[in-house]
Image (cartoon, rainbow, N blue to C red):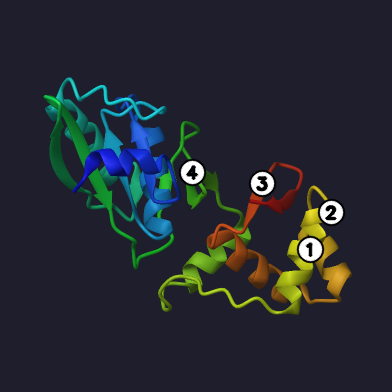
Amino acid sequence: MNIKRLILEGETVTQDFKKTITSCEKIAKTMVSFANNKGGRLLIGVADDGTIKGVKDEEEERYMITKAAHFFAKPALEPNFEEVYVDDKLVLIVEIPESDLKPHYALGDDGKWWVYVRVKDKSVLASKIVVDVLKRSNDDKGVLIEYSTKEKALLEYLETHDRITVKEYCTLLNLSRRRAQRIMVDLVLSGVIRVHTTEKEEFYTAA
């Protein structure tokens, strides 16, 4: 595995850099979002800007990741570890495969279990819609998007508007709520649009 080439790719839907693991909650959130998406890898010992810092205490990092995977994620995750030395610095690669037990939940600071999905290079809190789709998506592998007029209309709308809600989308195309939700979730999971969940509302923007 060419670690320098991986680092050049930067942080993506399937890759995240961590200089060190500081909290089980935070790392569980990232690992869960990978498992709920297409899988992904963590490069431990690499700063956000891609600088290789190296892992100081490998035992401790492995312990934190394993603890997060087993006690801060449910169903539990089984990370795969690989060690790579770059210029005498140790980088710990943690692979999280795509799960067929979706959705996975991560334990938050608030003591509640939340579902996260990976959108671009961020782990995003999944809405009720997304959680429903994850539950249903265990059967088919990944999300294959075929753009129909309904998807195109949504993306065209987002080219001229900052955001859209499910309700607005239903009105725009005279769709049932269920149909609109299904389209939006597919587009979120494939990283085309981004879902934003607040306490008051949920809206979507172009990714």
Badge 2 element? helix
Q: Residue at x 74, y 63 (%)?
A: 155
User: Going from the N terminus, do you reach mark 4 or mark 2 first?
Assistant: 4
Of circles 3 and 1, the one toward us is 1
Q: Is residue 148 above or below residue 170?
A: below
Residues at marks 4 and 2, CA–CA distance in whole angstroms: 24 Å
Within-10-Å neighbours for mark 3: few <14, some 14–19, many 20+: some
Q: Residue at x 22, y 52 (%)?
A: 78
Circles 1, 2 touching at the beta carbon (< 8 Å)? yes
Judging by the rendered image, the residue that carries numbered circle 2 is 160
Judging by the rendered image, the residue that carries numbered circle 1 is 156
Judging by the rendered image, the residue that carries numbered circle 3 is 197
Q: Amino acid at mark 4?
A: Asp
Of circles 2 and 3, the one toward us is 2
Q: Position of residue 95 (x, y in %)?
A: 25, 50
Tell me the tag on residue 183.
none
Residues at marks 1 and 4, CA–CA distance in whole angstroms: 24 Å
Q: Position of residue 138 (x, y in %)?
A: 41, 72
Q: Amino acid at mark 1?
A: Glu
Q: Residue at x 26, y 22 (%)?
A: 53
How many tags in the picture? 4
Judging by the rendered image, the residue that carries numbered circle 4 is 121
Q: Amino acid at mark 2?
A: Thr
User: Going from the N terminus, do you reach mark 3 or mark 1 first?
Assistant: 1
Q: Position of residue 67 (x, y in %)?
A: 24, 38
* Picture quadrant of residue 106: top left
